[in-house]
Amino acid sequence: MQRRLRQLLSGFTVIEAEGRLHRWHEPMLLVGGDPRPVIRIAARFRQRAVVVLRRGGTTRLRLV
């Protein structure tokens, strides 16, 4: 699934990262670009939310 996701995000700037909280951890992708198509792709992969960061703006959790 991660490989397929990376293929769909090929037109975006993508940085691999890892989410961690105590013993839990999982790979994640940080994606730069217009959040609208990224949110649509996230919905296809059954993500419940994405974090949208805007330079000089507010960080928002967007439910999918």
Image (cartoon, rainbow, N blue to C red):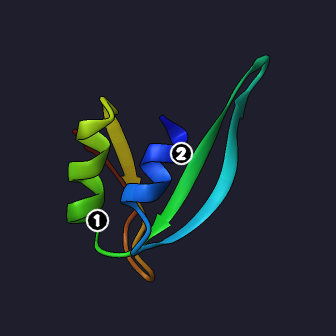
Q: Amino acid at mark 1?
A: Pro
Farthest residue to the bottom: give it: 56
Residue 56 placement, left or right of 24: left
Contact flag, marks 1 and 2 (Cβ < 8 Å): no
Q: CA distance from mark 1 to mark 2?
A: 20 Å
User: Which numbered disc, 1 or 2, marks the residue that appears first in the sequence?
Assistant: 2
Q: Residue at x 41, y 62 (%)?
A: 9
Nearest to the observer: residue 33 or residue 59: 33
Residue 28 placement, left or right of 52: right
* Circle on res. 3: 2
Tag 2: Cα neighbours inside 10 Å, few (<14), some, or many (≥20)?
A: few
Q: Position of residue 63 (x, y in %)?
A: 24, 39
Q: On the rendered image, what quadrant is the C terminus found in?
A: top left
Query: According to the image, label 1 marks what residue?
Result: 35
Q: Position of residue 43 (x, y in %)?
A: 24, 39
Residue 55: which quarter of the image? bottom left
Q: Residue at x 62, y 64 (%)?
A: 15
